Image: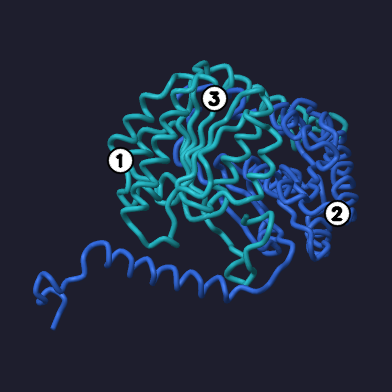
Chain colours: A cyan, B blue
Amino acid sequence: MTDDAKPDDAKPDDATRHREKMEKRKAVQDAEVAAKTIEKGLLIVNTGPGKGKTTAALGLALRMLGRGHRVGIVQFIKGAWDTGEAHALKVFGDRVAWHAMGEGFTWETQDKARDIAACLNAWNQATDLMADPGIRLLILDELNIALRYDYLDLDAVVATLKARRPDLHVVVTGRNAKPALIEAADLVTEMGSVKHHFAAGVKAQEGIEF
Amino acid sequence: MTDDAKPDDAKPDDATRHREKMEKRKAVQDAEVAAKTIEKGLLIVNTGPGKGKTTAALGLALRMLGRGHRVGIVQFIKGAWDTGEAHALKVFGDRVAWHAMGEGFTWETQDKARDIAACLNAWNQATDLMADPGIRLLILDELNIALRYDYLDLDAVVATLKARRPDLHVVVTGRNAKPALIEAADLVTEMGSVKHHFAAGVKAQEGIEF
């Protein structure tokens, strides 16, 4: 006898059907969670033309700080991290180690040799932080841009990232991530722009873009 | 005379060409920035199957807090915001107002009536925070899930969001954003999953997923 053919008083009510559906869903989810047993420091890449690449990295920093760990941040473009997040992260004191602002390369200098030197300097800071056992998460903000312009050697960067400590999570942000980096990564998210307020003439605003 | 036909000593060198290219690029960017003059509180939607929807909202919260503003957070799924970010945000004291954890709906209850009541309660908290002139950014975490299950009335929610104060930024997160919400939004980002470590058997880890 099909469900539809049952007399009304024998049909499971909406609440019961809902409970059964959710029970099944939870069982599937529990089995999926139980099947995953590996713990490892992840190489995470946030790329794509949409918003959220850097802010998602910042959110991970907040989560890691909340868990009591230290976080390292290196910015490869000057001014990409502006005073909003810089001020906020100050409350965490020396639990946030970051590469001094005002370095990194920039469209403002128009000096390629200087920009390459700034990228190399930032990369040296990054490798120092990778060697610091107190750092649990390292954010390499806009590293993809430096790689795209060949201001750093892609093979060397990828090899160093792959050789990271087993418990170190690294987040690389920026558009146009190189295929070799994506290949080496554990988690890659493409931020796609569905709709953008700049197209409607809205300017960059405090607390949102900077 | 074409550039190639010039004698060697008359050709612009690499540094000069680079500087000219960057100057042009900067001029285009400056003109674009100058053309955008509108300031308004944005309705932002972070959707899609990839990671980063909630963490990007958290990053915006950090940026807004760094600018000295207060932030409101309402979670529509119990446990979606776990202790990592909760602990970290405590350092900002009452500058972060959030809807108490342990409410919101969950796959664990398997009780639809209770879940609908929890969503309505969370939505009431959201409207209270929207009315608080001290709040500059309001995060409605996983609201898309509540809307997808029709636990809240879509038309009423969208109408309330559209009628927000002109200086209030709202971020809605969760997969499967409804078309009516996308239509009303100023900024919509689709987080796409290019590669995910869960597929390689890596488990959810402290500081990354929670």
Alpha-carbon span between mark 2 and mark 1? 47 Å
Residue A153: x %, y % from top left? 29, 41
The CA distance from mark 3 to mark 2 is 36 Å
Q: Amino acid at mark 1?
A: Leu
Is label 1 in a helix, a strand or a loop? helix
Identify the residue shown where x is 71% and y is 68%.
B39
Circle 3: element type: strand
Q: Is residue B69 above or below residue A42?
A: below
Which quadrant would the N terminus of chain A be assigned to in this image?
top right
Mark 2 residue type: Met
Q: Nearer the viewer, residue B30 or B175?
A: B30
Q: CA distance from mark 3 to mark 1?
A: 23 Å
Q: Are marks 3 and 1 on the same chain?
A: yes
Closer to us: B44 or B41 = B41
Sort mark 2 into few (<14), some (14-19) or many (20+) by Cα contacts within 10 Å.
Answer: many
User: Is B185 on the left-hand or right-hand side of B121?
Assistant: left
Determine crowd level at label 1: few under 14, some 14-19, many 20+ residues with C-alpha closer than 10 A: some
Q: Which residue was labeled with disc 1? A: A154
Out of A176 and A190, give the one closest to the viewer.
A176
